[in-house]
Amino acid sequence: MTDDDENTARDRPGGELYPLVIAVTRSPAERLRLAERLDGVAPLLLVADLDELRRLIGVPGTLPGPAPATAPAPDTSDDTLTIDSVRSTARYGDREVSLTRLEHDLLTCLTTEPVRVWAYAELHRSVWHDEGLDSRADVHSLVKRLRRKLADLGTGITIDAVRGVGFRLTDHRRPRVTGA
């Protein structure tokens, strides 16, 4: 125990140290299971990822808010869709929208291979980090919100549904042309 721990313990009633259990898992089902199993053991903090934990405990450089003045927004004058993972935003030209963690993860997933058709199960594993069997409605809901934000940016980039299979990212401004 360090001097700081001893000083903190002396400030508490009875001078005891209290444990805190921190669990990091992306799966909501797993967080629920952990909460049920660890109920009454100790105070419990459940987070989806380490970035969320850093924001909660106030690790310098990860607090929400405007970007520091020393790190200007990237130049997007060439009309490139830019995903800022630190600030959880998407930027196109002079427009910017904030993204939820799920929206960010879905957009990042779709942009890794833009032409690829992503099956529902693959998207569920990549975004929610679970199998998501028979859970197409949550994927559709997330895609609907992300489509709206992409439209607000004016990108011309959309998420197209491939009936019965899944989704893919499509750039309608620059259609691919193949020669004969």
Image: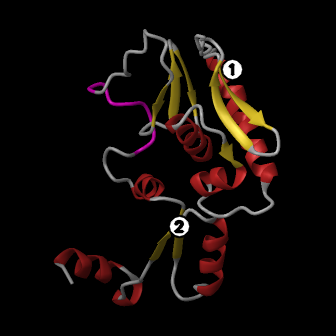
Identify the coloring: secondary structure
Mark 1 surroundings: few (<14), some (14-19) or many (≥20) residues within 10 A: few
Predominant secondary structure in magenta?
Answer: loop
Q: Nearer the viewer, residue 2 or 25?
A: 25
Report the span colored magenta.
63-70
* Amino acid under disc 1: Ala
Residue 160, quarter of the rendered image: top right
Q: Quadrant of the C terminus?
A: top right
Vertical order, 165 against 145 (above or below): below
Task: Name the element at disc 2.
Answer: loop
Q: Is residue 81 above or below residue 85?
A: above
**Mark 2 burial class by Cα count in 10 Å: few <14, some 14-19, many 20+:** some
Which image quarter: residue 109? top right
87 left or right, relative to 11: right
In the image, farthest residue toward the left: 3
Question: How far from the left and from the top, in percent, is residue 64?
Answer: 45, 41
Residue 126, position as x, y percentages in the image: 57, 53
- Could you tell whether 42 is left or right of 4 in the image? right
Residue at horizontal 72 percent and vertical 27 percent from the top: 148
Question: In the image, what residue occupies the spot 58% across and 10% down?
Answer: 179
Three-letter amino acid code at disc 2? Thr
Which picture quadrant has residue 116?
top right
When the figure is inspected, residue 99 is found, relative to residue 35, above or below; the finding is above
* Residue 151 numbered mark, or none: 1
Q: CA distance from mark 2 to mark 1?
A: 32 Å
Q: On the image, numbered disc 2 is attached to which residue?
A: 25
